[in-house]
Amino acid sequence: IQNEMRDIYSAVQDLYAYVWSTSKFQSAENEQRIASLLERLSGDFHRVERRNGAAKVDPGFEVTLAANRELLKDIRSRFSEGNKDYAQWRLRSLVGNCISCHTRYQVPIDFAGETPTPTG
């Protein structure tokens, strides 16, 4: 499952460069790139689902994956409708779901990078 999770991490790393910056996330010039990253992230979560090994050991794993898939579906839908504020808000909360598994499997939890400190 490590390869699939590394692919997710790569997509998250690219995507969150936009998520933490409202101006970048709202920018029309970044819209296609963000949509592509959301698609990639959704696809990567489906690849993890097909690697069912962890689900046999930890039933919470399957539940967390299902929650993330539904959340990503909603985010992609809202983003494509132009509701970028909502999509950005939901993306910022997505990483909380990841921590639920990462803390049980003793893997690093710094996948979303530093949450920016508000200024002003």
Image: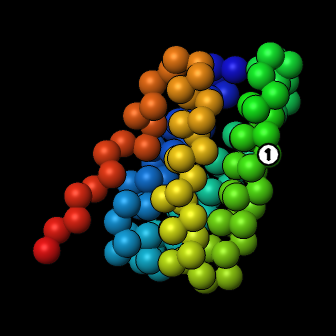
Q: Secondary structure at mark 1?
A: helix
The part of the image, by quadrant, that contains residue 98 is top right
Query: Is residue 107 something one can see in this rendering?
Result: yes
Residue 32, compared with residue 52, is above or below; it is below
The part of the image, by quadrant, that contains residue 23 is bottom left
Q: Quadrant of the C terminus?
A: bottom left
Q: Residues within 10 Å of mark 1 (few under 14, many from 20)?
A: some
Residue 14, compared with residue 85, is above or below; it is above
Residue 22, compared with residue 7, is above or below; it is below
Q: Nearer the viewer, residue 110 or 13?
A: 110
- 46 on left or right of 8: right
- 81 on left or right of 11: right
Which residue corresponds to the image point at 56% horizontal and 28% vertical from the top-left?
A: 102
Residue 73, compared with residue 10, is above or below; it is below
The extreme left residue here reads 120
Q: Nearer the viewer, residue 14 or 99?
A: 99
The part of the image, by quadrant, that contains residue 32 is bottom right
Query: Is residue 48 something one can see in this rendering?
Result: no
Which residue corresponds to the image point at 23% horizontal and 58% vertical from the top-left?
A: 117
Q: Nearer the viewer, residue 61 or 37?
A: 61
The amino acid sitting under disc 1 is Ala
x and y percentages locating residue 81 in the rendered image: 68, 82
x and y percentages locating residue 7 in the rendered image: 60, 33
Indicate how the structure is coloured in the image. rainbow
- 82 on left or right of 111: right
Q: Which residue is mark 1?
A: 66
Which residue corresponds to the image point at 57% horizontal and 53% vertical from the top-left?
A: 94
The extreme bottom residue here reads 82
Which residue corresponds to the image point at 49% horizontal and 59% vertical from the top-left?
A: 92
